[in-house]
Amino acid sequence: MCTIDTSMNIYEEALRAHKKARGKLAIVSKVPLKSRHDLSIYYSPGVAAVSERLAKHPSETPLYTNTHNSVAVVSDGTSVLGLGNIGPEGALPVMEGKAILFKHYAGIDAIPIVLNTQDPDAIIETVVAIAPSFGGINLEDIAAPQCFYIEDELKKRLSIPIMHDDQHGTAVVVLAGLINATRYVKKDLSACKVVLVGAGAAGIAIAKLLTQYAQPTIVAVDSKGVITTSRSDLTPEKQMLAQLSKNDGSTSLEQAIKGSDIFIGVSRSGLLTEAMVRTMAENPIIFALANPEPEILPTVAKAAGAAVVATGRSDYPNQVNNVLAFPGLFRGALDTHSAITDAHKMAAAEALAALVTHPTADAIIPSPFDRHVADNVAAVFKKR
């Protein structure tokens, strides 16, 4: 778990700004309330007609309510940013932030919901109970391995789009960046050796999506070394990752990184050294995504010969930011009444990559401020 250094100006400014605004959200009416007639139409007695209709025809709820455009952003606070398990109150500012991103980038009304339980079954029952109020569920900052079980069970029990963004949003943007990074260095992603460090929610989702899209050689590493089927300490999720990972005989990150084309880190700061980068293949690609401090600083990685470096930070080029994916994915899913499938995720990654027509070392991913991003991602749902 990292501890934020509040002596840094950006953190002090954020504390002041949040306190001044008293949060980042407000609810605004879509209809006028200027007369008795308005009250009669939009509340009592007129609303009774709508309630009676929906009681008889529940499938029409999106036609008469805001469920066609609403998403619940749900967290238990067990894996917030790089801060770890800080509980619901600690998670709430992040969920509010997620909600304003939904609105700003995709016009979706999102409501932050933080739960005072970390029991997976209690979380599932709670989300199922509140689901009639929403058109989709965005799971956020829920630790592995519980996040896999929670998402899978909710998909079985609910008919609305469900997505754990820490898994799938991250995987989509990583794949988009790798499509353009390999294009820039003139390598075939399918022929690359990828060292993936971090076997949590994001790492497992990245491995799955990369395998489905290009089937590169993946060597996965956790805190105990290379993940192989011969290890007896693997969770079910890591066992699956071991099946996707190639056993090349290496046992440590230092051994696995030799001759590799791509490093993807979703682990912890300082893990990758300059010496390790120097042992990689020619023109290596580094995605050091630990937050707030990456596995290796871009300046150090480039000094060691990295051709392309991406991080999760906004103060360096090539920020792998989930905001490039989740607003458009939910916009498309809500508009087409669709689940968010692996096919949608791969198509979304291609759509993001296509927005960068001439990739360079410092431009492999579109900017979050490119207003075409959400529309291009949402459009993939209409093509399927």
Image (cartoon, rainbow, N blue to C red):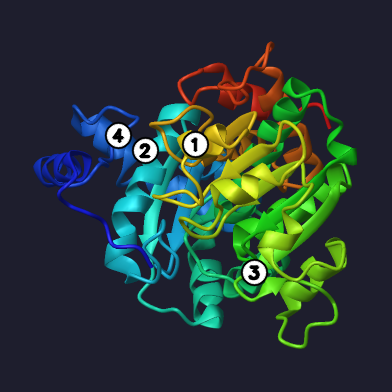
Query: Measured from the top left, where is residue 322 in percent x and y?
Result: 53, 41
Residue 29's label in the rendered image is 4
Which tag is nearer the camera, tag 2 or tag 4? 2
Instruction: Point out the tag, 1 or 2, that comes first from the N-terminus.
Output: 2
Query: Measured from the top left, where is residue 4 in percent x and y?
Result: 26, 56
Give SS at disc 3: strand
- Is residue 124 in sight in this rendering? yes
Spatial CA span between label 1 and label 3: 22 Å
Mark 3 neighbour density, 10 Å: few (under 14) some (14–19) many (20 or more): some
On screen, residue 325 versus residue 246, left or right, reads: left
Question: What residue is shown at x 59% (from left), y 40% (from top)?
Answer: 330
Which residue position holds label 2?
100
Which residue position holds label 3?
222
Instruction: Point out the tag, 3 or 2, that comes first from the N-terminus.
Output: 2
Q: Amino acid at mark 1?
A: Pro
Instruction: Point out the tag, 1 or 4, that comes first from the N-terminus.
Output: 4
Give SS at disc 4: loop
On screen, residue 40 versus residue 257, left or right, reads: left
Quadrant placement of the N terminus: bottom left
Q: Observer-nearest residue: 306 or 104? A: 306
Spatial CA span between label 3 and label 4: 49 Å
Question: What residue is shown at x 62% (from left), y 30% (from top)?
Answer: 308
Quadrant for residue 97, please give it: top left
Give SS at disc 1: helix
Spatial CA span between label 1 and label 2: 29 Å
Which residue position holds label 1?
298
Q: Residue furthest bottom?
A: 232
Q: Amino acid at mark 3?
A: Asp
Quadrant for residue 20, please give it: top left
